[in-house]
Amino acid sequence: MPKEETGVPARTRLDVYDSYLLLLTSYFLLLEHEVFVKLAVLESGLMMCRMNPLQDHPPGKLIAVEGLDGSGKSTQIYLLKRWLELQGMRVFFTEWNSSVLVKKATSKAKKRNLLTATTFSLIHATDFADRYEREIVPLLRAGYIVLADRYIFTAFARDVVRGNDPLWVRSIYSFAVKPDLTFFFKAPLETSLSRILDGRPTLKYHEAGLDMGWTIDPYESFRIFQGKIFEQYLGMEKEFEFIPMEATGTIESQQQQVRNIVSERIDLQRYKTLRRQ
Amino acid sequence: MNQKRFFGQGLPRLDLSKLTGKLIVIEGADGSGRSVQIAKLTEWLEAKGHAVAHVGLRRSTLVSEELEQAKQGNILGKTTMSLFYATDFADQLENRIIPALRAGFIVLADRYIYTLMARDIVRGSEVNWVESLYGIALVPDAVFFLHTGARQLVERNFQKNGRLDYWESGMDLGLANNMFDSFIRYQKKIQHEYKWMEEKYGFKVVNGNRSIQSILKDFKSHLLPLIDPTDPDLAGNKL
C-alpha cells in the first residue's frame, strides 16, 4: 500500500472517524458540553496536521476574521490592514469567493439553481483551494502577513447548516493551514441581522438560504439561516481557538483590542518591508 | 435485491433503498478500449430489454466547460483540480446516476472515482484525503478494470489520435522531457495505484490485450449473473 506517511492505513482512518462520529453524537446527547468540545478539538487537530505544505513553521502569518454578515468583521480587518500597511509591513488581504475561473462556474450554477448541498460545498472548496494554492501559500512562504476576511470556518458553518456531514466538510479542507489568529466577531444575532436587513437589501437565493426550503420569504429565511450559522460558529469557538470579539463599545475601541492582540501575539518587526536607503 | 451503500458518509437525505438499478463501472486508461466495450455492451443490454444510461468524467452540466478550459490552460493547482473534478463527479452522481438508478436503469460509467483517485494520488494527494473526499460516492455493483500494458496503450493512442494526450501523459508532473517517456512513466505510476485499489475495492480485472470479441465475452459472463440470474443465455452458455 502506498502513501502511508501518517503510519495509519487508509481504511483504519475512516473507521476511526466513523467511531468518532458515533462517540461525538452520543456524548453530545448524554454528557455536558465540555466533552463534546474536547473530542472535537482532538478530531480537528488530527485533520489539520495532515497534508499541509506549510506545517513546518511558515515564515508568514495568517490572521482570519469570522462572523456573520453585519458583525463588523470586514470593517475591523480593513482597519487592521491599514494600520499594518502604514507601518510598512508586508501585508496582503484576501476574501472569500474571489477567484476568477471558479467564479464563472459558481455564478452560472447559482443563476440556474443547479447546486445541491454537496456540490455547493465542493464548488466553494474548489474556489478556496484555487485562492489558497495561488495566493495564500506563496505569500505565507514569502513571509507576508495574510489577512483573510472569512476562512475555512465560513465553509464549516454554512455547509453543515446545509446538511453536509461536519467531518466530511472538515476533512475536505484539511489541506488548509490553521490561522495563527482567528478573530470571531460575536455580535448578537439581532444586531447583525438588523444591520443587514434594515436596508431591505435584495437577498440572493443562496445567501438567504432559500434553497433550504424553510420558508419562501427571503427575509425570514435569512434570519433562520443566519441563526443556524451563528450556532455553528459558537460551537467552533473552542474547537478552533477563536479569539472572541464581543460587540461592545465603539469601532475604535474594538480596533484597539484587535491591534493589541496582534502585536502581543505576532512579532511584527519581522514583517517590515525591506527598504533601500 | 442487494442494498446500495456509500463509501463513506454519503449524500445527505438520500433513501438508498429506492435505487433499484445497477451501477456498472468500467475503468482503464485511454486506449484500453473502454468506449468500444461500452458501446457493444449497451447494444447487448438493450437487445435484452434493459434501459441503459451512460456517465463519464467531465460530463456534468455544472462545471464540465470550466474544467475543459482549466485543462487547456493548465493554470490550476493540484488540490484545486482535485476538487474541481470532485464537483463534476458529485453533480453527475446527484443529477444523473442516482435518478437513473432510481428509475431502474443500468448505469454504465465510463470511469469512476478510482481514476480520479489514482490521478490525485500520483500528484501527491494523500490517500486518506481522497478517500474521504469521495466518501459521498455510491459503491458500484461491479467494477471492471481493463488492464492494458503501457506499450499497447501508446500504440492504440497513436492509431486513434495520431498523438499522445498531454494529461494522459502526465506532462504536468515533469516526469520526463519528452511525451513518450512521460506517458510510459505516468501510466506505470497510475497502474501502481490501480494495483492496490484492485484488491481493496474488488475490481474484476479484464485482460485488455486481446480481441474486442473475447473481451466482450468476458464482460458478458461477469455481468449476466448480476443483471439477470435467470437469463437462459447463462445456462446455455451462449454469450
Image: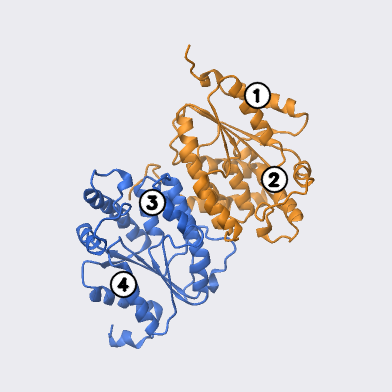
Chain colours: A orange, B blue
The residues tagged by marks 3 and 4 sit, at their Cα atoms, a distance apart of 28 Å
Q: Which residue is mark 3?
A: B72
Quadrant of residue B141 within the rendered picture = bottom left
In the image, taking residue A181 as reference, residue A126 lies left or right, namely left
Amino acid type for the residue under numbered disc 4: Gln
Amino acid type for the residue under numbered disc 3: Gln
- From this view, report whether residue A83 is shown above or below residue B171: above
Observer-nearest of A90 and B99: A90
Q: Position of residue A102 (x, y in %)?
A: 51, 49
Quadrant of residue A97 within the rendered picture = top right
- From this view, report whether residue B29 is shown above or below residue B170: below
Mark 4, chain letter? B
Q: Are marks 1 and 3 in contact (CB under 8 Å)?
A: no
Mark 2, chain letter? A
Q: Mark 2 packing: few (<14 Cα in 10 Å), some, or many (20+)? A: many
Q: Which residue is mark 2?
A: A230
Instruction: Tell me the SS state at disc 4.
Output: helix
Q: Which residue is mark 4?
A: B37
Q: Which residue is mark 1?
A: A259
Instruction: Tell me the SS state at disc 3.
Output: helix
Q: Residue furthest top?
A: A277
Quadrant of residue B108 within the rendered picture = bottom left
Residue B133 in view, yes or no? yes
The residues tagged by marks 2 and 1 sit, at their Cα atoms, a distance apart of 25 Å
The residues tagged by marks 1 and 3 sit, at their Cα atoms, a distance apart of 45 Å
Q: Name the front one of labels 3 and 2.
A: 3
Mark 1, chain letter? A
